[in-house]
Image (cartoon, rainbow, N blue to C red):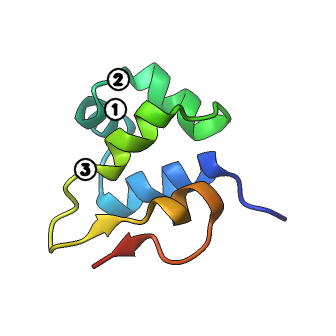
Amino acid sequence: MLEMEYHRVKKLRESLGYSLKEFASLLGITGADMYEYETEKIMSYEMIEKIKNLDCGNGQHINIDWLQTGDGTMFLE
């Protein structure tokens, strides 16, 4: 079964250790909007850019290719 983008958004959030509400706050959106992104809403270019620019710590960055397609690893050095 193909993993959808919205499943990867949730995996990313959980991997970073944030609650839904905390992650939404980092992205400047409501918890309700974050829930929609994690359950089937297609992300806009603006939302992808916000996620891309998150500081993951340890010099890691989010791999947008992974987020959008599932290819590669979740994080890039």
Report the residue at 15% width, 66% height from top: 57
Residue 8 x, y percent position in the rendering? 56, 56
Q: Residues within 10 Å of mark 3 (few under 14, many from 20)?
A: few
Q: Report whether 73 appears left or right of 70.
A: left
Report the residue at 27% width, 79% height from top: 77
Q: Which amino acid does label 2 sit on?
A: Ile
Tell me if residue 72 comes above or below residue 66 in the rendering.
below
Q: In which quarter of the image is residue 6?
A: top right
Q: What residue type is labelled 3?
A: Leu
Report the residue at 44% width, 42% height from top: 48
Q: How crowded is mark 2: few (under 14 residues within 10 Å), some or many (20 or more)?
A: some
Q: What residue type is labelled 1?
A: Ala
Along the polypeptide, which appears first: circle 3 or circle 1?
1
Foreground mark, 3 or 1, reads: 3
Along the polypeptide, which appears first: circle 3 or circle 2?
2
Report the residue at 26% width, 30% height from top: 25
Q: Which residue lies furthest to the right in this view?
A: 1
Q: Which mark is residue 29?
A: 2
Q: Indicate the quadrant containing the N terminus: top left, top right, bottom left or bottom right.
A: bottom right
Residue contact between numbered discs 3 and 1, judged by CB atoms under 8 Å:
no
Q: Report whether 25 appears left or right of 58.
A: right
Residue contact between numbered discs 1 and 2, judged by CB atoms under 8 Å:
yes
Disc 2 secondary structure class: loop
The image shows a total of numbered marks equal to: 3
Q: How far apart are marks 1 and 2 (CA)?
A: 5 Å
The residue tagged 3 is 54
Along the polypeptide, which appears first: circle 1 or circle 2?
1
Disc 1 secondary structure class: helix
